[in-house]
Amino acid sequence: MLDIKLFRENIDVVKEGLKKRNQEINLDQLMDWDNTRRAIITEIDQLRLKRNTDSETVGKLKREGKEPEKELLEELEQLRTRIQEKEKFLLNVENQIEDFLLRIPNIPDETTPVGKSDKDNVVVRVVGEPVKFSFKPKHHWEIGEKLGILDFERASKISGSRFSLLKNEGCALERAIITFFLDTHKQSGYQEIMTPYLVNRASMRGTGQLPKFEEDLFRCPDDELYLIPTAEVSVTNLHRDEILDEKQLPIKYASYSACFRREAGSYGKDTKGLIRNHQFNKVELVKFVKPEDSAKELELLTNDAEKVLQLLGIPYRVMALCSGDIGFSSTKTYDLEAWMSGEGMYREISSCSNFKDFQARRMNCKYKSAASKKREFVHTLNGSGVAVGRTFATILENYQQEDGSVVIPEVLRKYTGFDIIKPKK
């Protein structure tokens, strides 16, 4: 959530940021509400002052054994009623302001490329070269089904479209990827944490999923709980309504979780395979940092996500997302795109973002600053470290052999217990 002071003191910054996002939001209503709010507060303060003066007069008269005049007592009661009415009206205006602010996206960082869509994203670096095969490479879903490690037909029977079912060595490979990711990130200083998959509305609001993106979420209405679309939600909300010690920062968490997404608006896209499922596994990296460090910490976070792809030997590229393609809460984002040999294209496998104080304001997460001697909002960052299902898919496509087998990347073999998956006879 953006600071209301930014709208009051430099609304042109907000308008320019929204323009970069290709969004037009009429801010006049917000400013009218804010002016009304401040006027009401002034009225309430004046009424309270008058009420306090009258109360003191009544108290003094009673102490002197005198009976206050009826008109004075009536005026005092009217003041109390008016204050209650004004306070109720103020609360309504403040709720309108908050709801409006919660629906306004973050302002792009000055280093975020300006653009309208993913076509305007910028290649930052390319690591590794696409695998060259002596045969026509297959898609991961073809490979997996022939190896007997993926079964989309039965997954559909059980749950519907956009679900997957792993079998045999596929289960071991999935577990191996998860454990390898966690072990690697722990070596880089991240604390491993496992959080609930069901969270309350306040948690979803804290990281920016609510109120704007409710249609993308799986909800349990009887309990007013939501299935997490990413561990970012539960992990980032760990420190909601907390004041952290500056010495604790940066705080770095790595968390494995299942993720649940409706994929609203993506119908017809990636209907086959593991790329866009309603349920998938992911290892998430989350950071809480000091404001002056967040730009540097985004680069480090991105490097940490890249490390697992490098160790797996998967070719990838780093993309700086343009202002029209960054997420609602993000001010700057790097996407890691892994090469998929079967498709002959790069696919997003991780998204690493800096939110600055956008999420922290929604969550009321602060730290005690030694420099300013004040409580200031932390900056939050997160990134996939990385998506497990997509890693599974890219391993199948990049390590496939002409006979249909798939070689296991060397770093995973101590976790899988085997170095190749062969077709069943």
Image (spheres, rainbow, N blue to C red):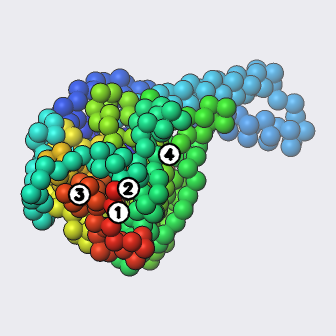
Q: State the CA–CA distance, disc 4 to disc 3.
A: 40 Å
Mark 2, residues whose alpha carbon is within 10 Å: few (<14), some, or many (≥20)?
few
| Amino acid marked by disc 1 | Ile
**Mark 4 touching mark 1, by CB under 8 A?**
no
Disc nearest the viewer among 4 and 3: 3
Instruction: State the residue position of label 2.
Output: 425
* Disc 1 secondary structure class: strand
Q: Which residue was labeled with disc 4?
A: 228
Quarter occupied by the N terminus: top left
- Mark 4: few, some, or many residues within 10 Å (few <14, many ≥20)? many
Q: Mark 1 to mark 3: distance in Å? A: 11 Å
* Picture disc at residue 403: 3
Residue behind mark 1: 421
Q: Is residue 384 visible?
A: no
Q: Dot 1, crowdedness within 10 Å: few (<14), some or many (≥20)? A: many
Q: Is residue 86 left or right of residue 395?
A: right
Q: Nearer the viewer's eye, disc 4 or disc 1? A: 1
The mark nearer the N terminus, 4 or 3, is: 4
The amino acid on which the numbered mark 4 sits, given as a three-letter code, is Ile
Q: Can residue 18 be seen in the rendering of this structure?
A: yes
Up-down: is 263 above or below 189?
A: above
